Amino acid sequence: MRVMRNWIRSKPAPAPRRNHGEAGVLALLAVLVPLRALALEANEWKYRQPFTVTRPGVVKFALPPATLDVAQPRLGDLRLVDGTATQIPYLLQPSTPAAPATRRAPRSFRSELTESSTQLYLETGYEAPVAGISLVTPAPAFLKAARVEVSANGRDWRQIATGIPLFRQFGAEELRLKFEPVRTSHLRVTLDDSRTRPIPITSAALAFAAGADAGATLPLPVRITNREEFASESVLTLDLGAQHVPLSTLEFTAREPLFARPVTIGVRELRGDVAVERTLFRGSIYRLAIDDLPARAQLSLPIEMTAPSRELLIHIHNGDSPPLGIEAVKAAHRPIWLLFHAPAAGIYTLLTGNPDVGAPRYDLGMVGDSLKQAAAGDVALSAPALNPSYRRPDTLADTPLTGAPLDPRDWNLRKPVRVASAGVQQLELDPDVLAGAQREFGDLRLLRDGTQVPFILERPALSRSVAVVIAAANDPKRPRLSRWHLKLPRPGLPITQLTLTTTTPLFERHLRLYEVIEDVRSGRFERALAVADWRATPGNRSPLVLAITLPPIGDTLVLETDNGDNPAINLAAATAVHPVTRLLFKTDPTELALYYGNPRTPAARYDVALVAPQILSAEKHVATLGPEEKARVEGWARSALQGARGGVLFWSVLALVVVALLVVVARLLPKPPAAP
């Protein structure tokens, strides 16, 4: 395909030095108007957006998110043409965020403890306005109300802010004290210790006023397409409506009166042959009320990033608290302005959607600064429409729905897959598949009428919790030992974490988790899974979390501890956690089946990985799994021998076969001659 390099080489005559708004811009651009680039072959661009210019002159408008969605990430394929398909030079002016606040160490810092407060004294040593203070503390959990005062001499204090929340709880934290910029030589911060014990403050940094914001933000319509509750976290799938949008803020609407939650924002991406999640932002949202002070809230996250996908995954970490009732999410983005000089009124067209073309180079350096001073106009830009003469096919539309044929006779298990509507599907593997498939899921196959359906294996940073049945299994011969059997939903379920809770208020124990394995060669032995020390006091009865690095082989785990001369502890509940694994694929609503349980087959490799970005960013429909079925019918002998390998039934069948063979051999032997 021919790639046009759009150059404008000119030697304009010296223009008069005038800087009087649009008049100066017009004078400078008048020289460049006859030197426009040659006509384009518009059939190389997939999308077109016509708009009307009512009068000649400088035109400035913000590129809508729909244009950013279909263009290259850096807008290298954007072209502007007039009614004769002739290129028009243009400039792009991003709306950049304000410069971040400058942080510097104060000239001096000291802290004092009073009867009911901690007082921090800071000498600024700078003449610039101070807009905040960042504190550093090793305290793991606290909630304080802070008061900020200023002084010119270090003796006479004037209050400028009070009731500022300072906290670190459940992974969420706020260690910054923000206030209106003020010029001062001394600062005093008072932390209220009347209801909670003091915390150590090791250092502090001054935040000076940030630079002026280079541009305003515009609202971005977004919608929550899915909400899922996992172990200790909620995951919202947010559809931005477009990719490559420069996001500014995300604002949450929650109905709870008091809460504090850490928030993580990520996107799906492909690493190798596996879809994973990449974290883009970490922050906290909260609504807190300290003592009798009015509640303060921080529900807006200043993410300031360009979204690489139209879909964001928002993780709200709840810990042991109930999920937040997020009612809505609002977004704001920073517009990208397009400026050009329209030589005449008429129809102009934006062209986008050419992945093979490079960015244009226009000789607009001499008028760039003057052009950027123009005011935005009212331009009604239509939505991107398909170019009827476009020659390049849609990549995702050409994604194959089928793979190679496959005979599933070597697969032991299968499950029907229910698909409600056509498009990209998201199928989460249930405990049956997680336990019955290979550890790395190389034996998974999606089949439709004997033909494979290509898929992408996704392993997000998510977990599901499952209930564990507890049964006492004490040994009467060892009364000092407490032992429990923990029953999992399925043998071989790849759990990674086990959480135990108790009602015993005071104890300290060393616990051991293992499973008993019976093997033909090794016999009966214990397979260690985890060890931990558990301690509880009347004021701190936290659950015990056991990290399990080796997935269990069976479905029964053994937990035991030596009580010594103390009474036995009461194990109230146990919860296991396993990682979430999904399949992403594109299909029509038809009968599908997921096959698994073949330990000898290698992992599948599909060409659908070549269009993984389109699959990951597409809106997904949730597919579900049906009940487990036997994929093949075995003979009674093979089933008995295979299912009872190493057990009593195996040896019983083998003994019967030996006896039968001996009887047959005895009958075939010649009988001895009769005695005379």
Image (tube, grey):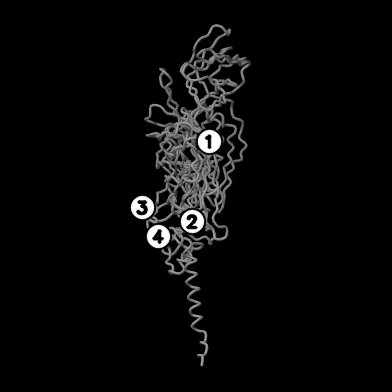
**Mark 2 element type:** loop
Which comes before the other along the chain, label 3 or label 2?
3
Of labels 1 and 3, the one closer to you = 3
Q: Tell me the tag on residue 437.
A: 2
Q: CA distance from mark 4 to mark 1?
A: 59 Å
Q: Name the amino acid, label 4.
A: Glu
Of labels 2 and 1, the one closer to you = 2
Q: CA distance from mark 3 to mark 2?
A: 25 Å
In front here: 219 or 495?
Answer: 495
**Quarter of the figure with residue 521:** bottom right
**Mark 3 element type:** loop
Which comes before the other along the chain, label 2 or label 1?
1
Which comes before the other along the chain, label 4 or label 1?
1
Q: CA distance from mark 4 to mark 2?
A: 14 Å
In front here: 259 or 221?
Answer: 259
Which comes before the other along the chain, label 3 or label 4?
3
Q: Which residue is label 3 attached to?
A: 420
Judge the density around disc 4: few (<14), some (14-19), many (≥20) Cα neighbours within 10 Å: few
Q: Residue at x 57, y 24 (%)?
A: 136
Of labels 3 and 2, the one closer to you = 2
Q: Which residue is label 4 attached to?
A: 629
Residue 167, image x and y in percent?
A: 49, 25
Which comes before the other along the chain, label 4 or label 2?
2
